[in-house]
Image (cartoon, grey):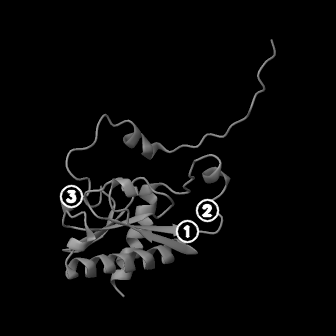
């Protein structure tokens, strides 16, 4: 009987994913409808009376933001002009903060409307802001189905929170 060859493997650690994969059931209520007193714990970077911006807990890339209306609404046609205006303000601040903090070379912006369109949380509208860099889609993503993030979410929050605060003074 021949021995299997020993393959040296690197280990990728993603400890923030444990809460997602180990949960027994879906959380009750909407994950985006929470008390503003929880903003720091929920990684909220900016909030107005109509909209807010937070880091995605399960990001596609470093600095992946979500921009949402405060009101629990799934359909963009139900948003008021004031809500759209505040969502736009959140998008603008997010892009400016990400440019200052991480110098991305581009962005993907978008909404997945409904679970069949890929929305992980279909009952509360949210706009994705995904910073992109040359080469960020490499063999790990394409062949390994794995994304490598270079910074812990808490550190990303600290860096972006400072930038959001600075953008607010402009």
Please tell me whether residue 12 is drawn above or below residue 88 in the rendered image: above
| Residue receiving disc 3 | 33
Q: Which of 148 and 109 is in front in this view?
A: 109
Residue at the spot 33% in from the left edge and 37% down from the top edge: 23
Q: Name the residue under label 1.
A: 132
* Residue 74 shown left or right of residue 162 in the figure: left
Q: Which residue is drawn at 50% across and 61% down?
A: 62
* Image x and y of residue 106, in percent: 55, 74
Disc 2 element: loop
Relative height, residue 131 to residue 116 (above, below): below
Q: Which of marks 3 and 2 is nearer the N terminus?
A: 3
Label 1 element class: strand
Disc 1 to disc 2: CB gap under 8 Å: yes
Image side of residue 129 versus residue 43, left or right: right
Q: Mark 2 points at which residue?
A: 136
Secondary-structure class at tag 3 = loop
Q: Which residue appears farthest toward the front when viewing the image? A: 116
Res 132 quadrant in image: bottom right
Q: Which residue lies furthest to the bottom in this view?
A: 170
Across and down, in percent, residue 151 comes to 52, 57
């Amino acid at each position: 009987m021949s021995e299997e060859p020993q393959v040296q493997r690197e280990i990728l650690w993603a400890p923030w994913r444990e809460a997602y994969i180990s949960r027994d059931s879906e959380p009750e209520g909407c994950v985006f409808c929470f008390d503003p007193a929880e903003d720091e714990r929920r990684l909220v970077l900016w909030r107005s009376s109509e909209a807010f911006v937070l880091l995605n807990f399960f990001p596609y890339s470093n600095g992946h933001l979500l921009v949402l209306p405060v009101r629990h609404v799934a359909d963009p046609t139900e948003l008021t002009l004031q809500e759209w205006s505040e969502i736009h303000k959140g998008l603008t601040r997010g892009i400016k903060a990400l440019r200052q903090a991480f110098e991305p070379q581009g962005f993907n912006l978008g909404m997945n409307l409904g679970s069949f369109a890929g929305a992980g949380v279909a009952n509360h509208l949210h706009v994705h802001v995904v910073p992109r860099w040359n080469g960020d889609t490499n063999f790990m993503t394409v062949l390994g189905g794995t994304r490598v993030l270079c910074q812990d979410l808490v550190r990303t929050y600290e860096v972006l929170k400072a930038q959001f605060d600075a953008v607010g003074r402009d």
